[in-house]
Image (spheres, coloured by chain):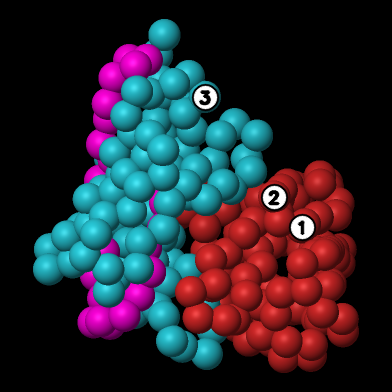
Amino acid sequence: DAGITQSPRHKVTETGTPVTLRCHQTENHRYMYWYRQDPGHGLRLIHYSYGVKDTDKGEVSDGYSVSRSKTEDFLLTLESATSSQTSVYFCAISESRPYQETQYFGPGTRLLVL
Amino acid sequence: AQTVTQSQPEMSVQEAETVTLSCTYDTSENNYYLFWYKQPPSRQMILVIRQEAYKQQNATENRFSVNFQKAAKSFSLKISDSQLGDTAMYFCAFMKSGGSNYKLTFGKGTLLTVNP
């Protein structure tokens, strides 16, 4: 299994509070991704990173920001959490070499915003 | 933009039998990858199988095989000798190759239940 951990694994928070989720990898992969999973939607890309300090938006980026100051860590921040951000959040990593782009996923973080 | 459609929200199969999960996709790209991921009740996303679009041969991994029809934009997953541990949500996913990122576009999933 790819060395990917996510913290926390579960979190309950209140509307309007900031929340930061952490993804940590031990594989030294260049690419890291944040997805959210909601019933009836599959997984949708929030943000991704293609290197330290290099990030870009995905299809559902509103209300989220990310940072990557080290290769191994990719942080997802909800500046002011809303109930619509209640979801399961997955981090993924991949290589950038041809034919090595398969994404491997972390265990997920279940977030409940009350 | 790419879209991935899984038309079967739920399926069931008896243990030891064979089941096929359907996936169609829409893209104007010629070079891409297709994947099937499995998500058991533990919620971990597990790669099942991968297919490169340039390869005519269908990918196989033990009891799992695909039927890749590029012209029809179809990518079905066949599970042979189904086991109770195969009970999971299955997601089909598309990735364009050769780009500056490797984003996955997922279908909405098919919930497969294997009955004893």
Callout 2 environment at 10 Å: few (<14), some (14 to 19), or many (20+)? Answer: few
Tell me, what hue is chain A?
Answer: red
Chain of the residue under label 2: A
Residue B16 shown in magenta:
yes
Q: Position of residue A40 (x, y in %)?
A: 44, 48
- Foreground of the two, A85 or A4: A4
Q: Residue at x 57, y 53 (%)?
A: A37
Q: What kind of residue is marked 2?
A: Asp
Callout 1 environment at 10 Å: few (<14), some (14 to 19), or many (20+)? Answer: many
Q: Is residue A5 visible?
A: yes
Q: Quadrant of residue A55?
A: bottom right
Secondary element at image label 1 = strand
The CA span between labels 1 and 2 is: 8 Å
Q: Which residues are magenta?
A: B12-36
Discs 2/3, front: 2
Q: Position of residue A27 (x, y in %)?
A: 77, 67
Q: What kind of residue is marked 3?
A: Gly
Residue ID for mark 1: A4
Residue ID for mark 3: B85
Q: Residue at x 82, y 79 (%)?
A: A71
Q: Which chain is cyan?
A: B
Secondary element at image label 3 = helix
Relative to B11, say whether B74 is above or below.
below
Q: Residue at x 62, y 59 (%)?
A: A104
